[in-house]
Image (cartoon, rainbow, N blue to C red):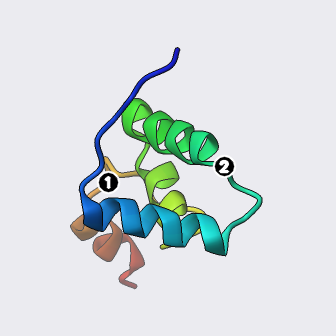
Amino acid sequence: MRATIYLPDDLAQAVEAYLKEHPQTSLSALVQEALRVRLERNPAALLELAGIVEKASVNAEEGAEDRLHRSRP
């Protein structure tokens, strides 16, 4: 599929800067990866894409309070 999309100036500049910093990544590959993450609704993949964490340590269904109670002696 081919598509033409509009990017506001600030987003276009951010994409251009990202691609300059990651010359091994094409615009097409970047868009495909972002769409896969969004469409799969995979929080761990989204965090990894954002560079926040490599691997989430808990399931998103598990609340922070559950984790707190487990860690108490």
* Residue topped by disc 1: 62
Residue 47, percent across and down? 46, 61
Whether residues under marks 1 and 2 lie with C-beta atoms below 8 angstroms apart, the answer is no
**Label 2 CA crowd tier, 10 Å (few <14, some 14–19, many 20+):** few
Asked whether residue 3 is in view, the answer is yes
SS class, disc 1? loop
Residue 56, percent across and down? 51, 62
Res 62 → quadrant: bottom left
Judged left or right of residue 2, residue 73 is left
Q: Nearer the viewer, mark 1 or mark 2?
A: 2
Q: Quadrant of the C terminus?
A: bottom left
Q: Nearer the viewer, residue 31 or 37?
A: 31
Asked whether residue 51 is in view, the answer is no
Q: Is residue 57 above or below residue 33?
A: below
Mark 1 and mark 2: span between their CA atoms? 36 Å
* Residue topped by disc 2: 26
Q: Residue at x 27, y 62 (%)?
A: 9
**Label 1 CA crowd tier, 10 Å (few <14, some 14–19, many 20+):** few
Q: Nearer the viewer, residue 44 or 63?
A: 44
Amino acid at circle 1: Glu
